[in-house]
Image (cartoon, rainbow, N blue to C red):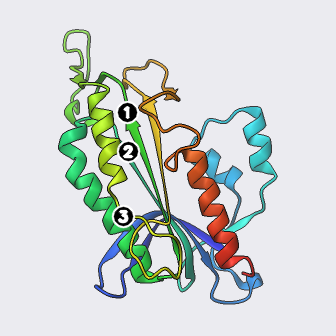
Amino acid sequence: MTFGINRQLNDWETGKKKDLDLVVARAPGPSTQAVGEALDLTTLAARYEVVLTADERQILDELPKGRSGTSGATVLVALEAKACMTAHVRALPRLYDELTSSHATVHGDNTNALAIGFVMVNLAESFISPDLHRRLITPEAPAQPSEHRQPHATERTISKIREIRRRPGPGSGRAGFDGIGIMVINMRNDGTPVQLVTTAPAPATNNEFYYGQMIGRAAHLYDSAFGNV
C-alpha cells in the first residue's frame, strides 16, 4: 500500500487533472517494491506540526508504516479537505464546484475508488483574513477583522454542502462522494484559542455529516470493497 499528500489524479473521461489532499493506493508491484520513502504518520505529524495529546500520539505511534508515492498505483481512497473560514456566502459557489470536481476526478480515475470529502466551517462572528492583511500589522495599523452574520453564514454553508451529490458506494453506477463530513469550529484568527463546536449548527453525533460518521462509513466501505487488498 502507498499513500500521497497533495497528489495529482487524472479524470480518464475528461483528461482533467486535480490535486487531492490525501490518496491511498495499491502499489503497482509487490509490497516489497512499494515506491517512495518509508513514512509513518508520526513522522508526517511532526513534519506538518500537528499538535497532539499524549494519548493521541500513542495511538498514532501504534499505526503501521506506509510508503509515500502513488505514481502508477491504483487509487483506492482519495480525500478532499476544504475550509470555509470567512466570506461564507460569497465563497459557496466555488466551494460547491471544487468539491463536486473532486469526486468527479476521483471516480474518473477509478470508478471503484472511494471519494471522501471533508469541510471545516468557521462559526466565529469575526475573522482576520490573511488575504486581506498582507501588510505588517502594528499597533498603529491594527488588523481589521471581517464580520460574519452568525449562525446564518454557517447554516447556509452547511445547507449548500448537503446539496453535493453522494452515492451509496462503489458499483452503484452513480456519481458523488462515498462519504462526506462537516466540522464546525470557532476561530477568530487573532491569537485566541480555536474551539471545536459540538452544538448546533454543527452536525450531531448521529448525523450522517458528523466527522465520526464519515470515518466510520469510509472504513466500512473500504473493508467491503478492498478487504482482500
- Name the residue tied to disc 3: 165
In three-dimensional space, the C-alpha distance between marks 2 and 1, rounded to whole angstroms, equals: 8 Å
Estimate how packed mark 2 is, as few (under 14), some (14 to 19) or many (20 or more) residues with alpha carbons within 10 Å: some
Residue at horizontal 70%, vertical 50%? 42
- Name the residue tied to disc 2: 83
| Mark earlier in primary sequence (2, 1) | 2
Rendered view: 78 above or below 162: below
- Label 1 near label 2: C-beta < 8 Å? yes
| Mark earlier in primary sequence (1, 3) | 1
Does residue 104 appear to the left or right of 134 in the view shown?
A: right
Front disc: 1 or 3: 3
- Name the residue tied to disc 1: 122
Residue 67 showing in the rendered view: yes
Q: Tell me which amino acid carries mark 1.
A: Asn
Name the secondary structure under disc 1.
strand
Q: Tell me which amino acid carries mark 2.
A: Ala
Residue at horizontal 32%, vertical 87%? 13
Q: 229 or 135, which is in the foreground?
A: 229
Residue 39 is labelled as: none
Residue at horizontal 64%, vertical 82%? 27
Q: 71 or 184, which is in the foreground?
A: 184
Q: 110 or 49, which is in the foreground?
A: 110
x, y percentage for residue 7? Answer: 46, 69
- Label 3 near label 1: C-beta < 8 Å? no
Rendered view: 152 above or below 67: above
Name the secondary structure under disc 2.
strand
Does residue 188 appear to the left or right of 59 in the view shown?
A: left
Estimate how packed mark 1 is, as few (under 14), some (14 to 19) or many (20 or more) residues with alpha carbons within 10 Å: many
Estimate how packed mark 3 is, as few (under 14), some (14 to 19) or many (20 or more) residues with alpha carbons within 10 Å: some
Name the secondary structure under disc 3.
loop
Image quadrant in which you'd find residue 2: bottom right
